[in-house]
Image (cartoon, grey):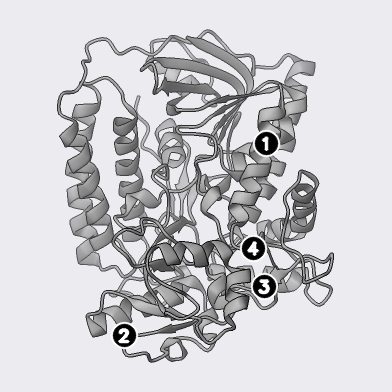
């Protein structure tokens, strides 16, 4: 079946839904999401959104904190644009009904502080900020008649001029255009053609590439893999942020202990109760995440312990329950009373700082294709994302991309340009059959995630990276053979995507011969000026 829209949004987190609302007055919008609309990384964001809203704070301070965290790789112009846009984006969220926490008895927003920030500037809705934002966005999206939501649909590949060329059509230009995507309806098993004048990749993160992650199951790097296969360059995928504090418990899957716990005075201690962060950074427990994650990793390796402990028991119990009501209640279900018990924590893959290369409007090198949110590499995060800049980036680039996408469509209508969508052949699965070996997918998925955790984790070496590259090459060959022989399923699509993202992370990590930000290689423990640049990968052209 073929569907035609003005805008095709792939992903339903804060970036995708914000974009959809921005453009809905200018055309018909399809939002494609591979599970339910609420299932995204956004829903799990506890901390908040960084924005300068206090007279004692300043844009310059937020910019400097972001640049310092990014360790020399940020684009200063992008950082300035995002930081200065933050207050207006927060006001827009308030206007659509997001109820941020206010100061006691007052009307002013309560501003928290997290690692790497020089000032209190984290706007939050208690400790469930992402959920509060997502619920308000979803409510507005579902009320908008111009936005059509397709749940349980997963994008397989983009449709571009190059795609059409491979199908035997004659193309007379070297410029590539995106016309939409092939999308699997998981309920019927049908693969439909979604055509659009602008396509937006907002699929979120890639945490499921690793065995241990704070991310939900949907975070399989789909947008990065899809864009790379289509010919869009990707960058800085060696910079994977490992959140320092995920709850260590056999039943606590993906359970993050927000950085705001340390922002409110929480202290990291080893198994003997000793606070250790002063040995690793003058900022102690409020150091940037890369520093804290490596410190925890080293403490665990020195002691042989399974975890370290995050202790906030010295704070007033009523304050803890009021500031972290969700976190407090959830920890109780696992047998921990955070007003009395230090919480066992370990690092876990959390955020991809790299992604699909875009300009300041979220545009990729493929015409009419945008990437926003965690899928993109905009230049904001550099070698290490500053806490609570992620939701901010998603909001700002949804706005930026919305402006440019609307402009492109309106110009096309005026000029009658080449953005008109041509006839596109349907998906062809001739010669394939249903797989009777699902265990192959499950086994390969598990193998990729374990090799990435063991060889391409918080601390890396040339030997481990070379071993990972040899094994991922073999796995890629096996997946390719399997993929073209059997009918497409969501599990197969995700496996194909995490394998590509794993390969790209490995290649970027092998290329960077230094240690900077989130990338630490024991063979090159220091920074080198010649590597103060982006690591960019492009898919080899296949004629």
Q: At which x and y percent is residue 413?
A: 76, 17
- Residue pointed to by mark 2: 271
Q: At which x and y percent is residue 226?
A: 43, 34
Give SS at disc 3.
helix
Residue at 36%, 59% in the rendered image: 252
Q: At which x and y percent is residue 404?
A: 72, 35
The answer to whether the residues at label 3 and label 4 have Cβ atoms under 8 Å apart is no
Residue 511 shown left or right of residue 196 in the figure: left
- Residue pointed to by mark 4: 126
Disc 3 to disc 1, C-alpha distance:
36 Å
- Residue pointed to by mark 3: 64
Disc 4 to disc 1, C-alpha distance:
20 Å
Of the two numbered discs 3 and 4 in the rendering, the one whose residue sits closer to the viewer: 4
Screen quadrant of the C terminus: top left
Nearer-the-camera pick, 98 or 320: 320
The answer to whether the residues at label 2 and label 1 have Cβ atoms under 8 Å apart is no
Disc 2 to disc 1, C-alpha distance:
45 Å
Q: Is residue 141 above or below residue 528?
A: above
Q: Earlier in the sequence, mark 3 or mark 4?
A: 3
Q: Earlier in the sequence, mark 3 or mark 2?
A: 3
Q: Is residue 458 above or below residue 479?
A: below
Mark 4 nearby-residue class (10 Å; few <14, some 14–19, many ≥20) = many
Nearer-the-camera pick, 167 or 276: 276
Asked if residue 490 can be seen in this view, the reply is yes
Disc 3 to disc 4, C-alpha distance:
26 Å
Asked if residue 382 can be seen in this view, the reply is no
Give SS at disc 4.
loop
- Residue pointed to by mark 1: 139
Mark 1 nearby-residue class (10 Å; few <14, some 14–19, many ≥20) = few
Residue 58 shown left or right of residue 533 in the figure: right
Q: At which x and y percent is residue 475?
A: 19, 41
């Amino acid at each position: 079946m073929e569907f035609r829209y003005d805008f095709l949004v792939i992903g339903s987190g804060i970036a995708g839904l914000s974009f959809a609302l921005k453009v809905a007055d200018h055309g018909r919008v399809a939002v494609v999401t591979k599970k339910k609309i609420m299932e995204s990384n956004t829903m799990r964001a506890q901390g908040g959104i960084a924005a300068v809203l206090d007279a004692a704070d300043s844009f310059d301070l937020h910019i400097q904190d972001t640049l310092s965290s990014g360790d020399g790789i940020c684009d200063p112009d992008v950082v300035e644009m995002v930081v200065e846009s933050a207050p207006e984006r927060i006001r827009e969220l308030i206007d659509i009904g997001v109820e941020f926490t206010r100061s006691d008895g007052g009307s002013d927003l309560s501003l928290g502080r997290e690692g790497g920030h020089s000032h209190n500037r984290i706007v939050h809705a208690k400790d469930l900020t992402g959920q509060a934002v997502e619920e308000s966005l979803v409510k507005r999206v579902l009320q908008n008649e111009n936005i059509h939501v397709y749940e349980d649909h997963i994008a397989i590949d983009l449709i571009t001029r190059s795609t059409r060329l491979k199908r035997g059509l004659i193309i007379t230009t070297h410029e590539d255009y995106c016309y939409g995507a092939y999308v699997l309806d998981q309920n019927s098993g049908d693969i439909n053609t979604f055509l659009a004048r602008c396509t937006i990749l907002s699929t979120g993160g890639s945490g499921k590439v690793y065995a241990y992650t704070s991310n939900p199951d949907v975070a399989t790097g789909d947008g990065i893999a899809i864009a790379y296969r289509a010919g869009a360059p990707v960058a800085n995928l060696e910079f994977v942020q490992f959140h320092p504090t995920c709850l260590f418990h056999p039943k606590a899957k993906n359970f993050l202990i927000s950085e705001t716990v340390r922002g409110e005075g929480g202290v990291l201690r080893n198994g003997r109760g000793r606070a250790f962060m002063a040995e690793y950074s003058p900022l102690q427990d409020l150091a940037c995440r890369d520093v804290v994650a490596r410190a925890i990793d080293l403490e665990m390796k020195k002691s042989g312990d399974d975890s370290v402990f995050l202790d906030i028991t010295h704070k007033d119990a009523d304050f803890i329950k009021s500031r972290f009501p969700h976190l407090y209640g959830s920890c109780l279900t696992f047998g921990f009373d955070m007003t009395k018990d230090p919480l066992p924590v370990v690092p876990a893959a959390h955020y991809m700082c790299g992604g699909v290369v875009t300009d300041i409007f979220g545009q990729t090198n493929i015409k009419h294709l945008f990437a926003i949110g965690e899928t993109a590499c905009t230049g904001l995060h550099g070698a290490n994302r500053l806490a609570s800049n992620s939701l901010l980036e998603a909001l700002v680039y949804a706005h930026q991309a919305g402006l440019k996408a609307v402009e492109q469509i309106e110009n096309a209508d005026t000029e009658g340009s080449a953005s008109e969508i041509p006839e596109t052949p349907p998906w062809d699965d001739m010669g394939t059959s249903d797989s009777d070996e699902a265990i192959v997918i499950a086994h390969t998925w598990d193998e990729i995630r374990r090799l990435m955790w063991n060889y391409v984790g918080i601390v890396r070496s040339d030997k481990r990276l070379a071993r990972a590259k040899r094994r991922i090459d073999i796995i890629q060959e096996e997946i390719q053979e399997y993929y073209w022989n059997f009918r497409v399923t969501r599990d197969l699509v995700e496996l194909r995507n995490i394998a590509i993202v794993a390969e790209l992370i490995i290649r970027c990590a092998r290329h960077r011969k230094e240690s900077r930000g989130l990338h630490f290689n024991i063979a090159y423990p220091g920074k080198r000026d010649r590597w103060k640049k982006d690591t960019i990968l492009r898919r080899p052209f296949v004629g």
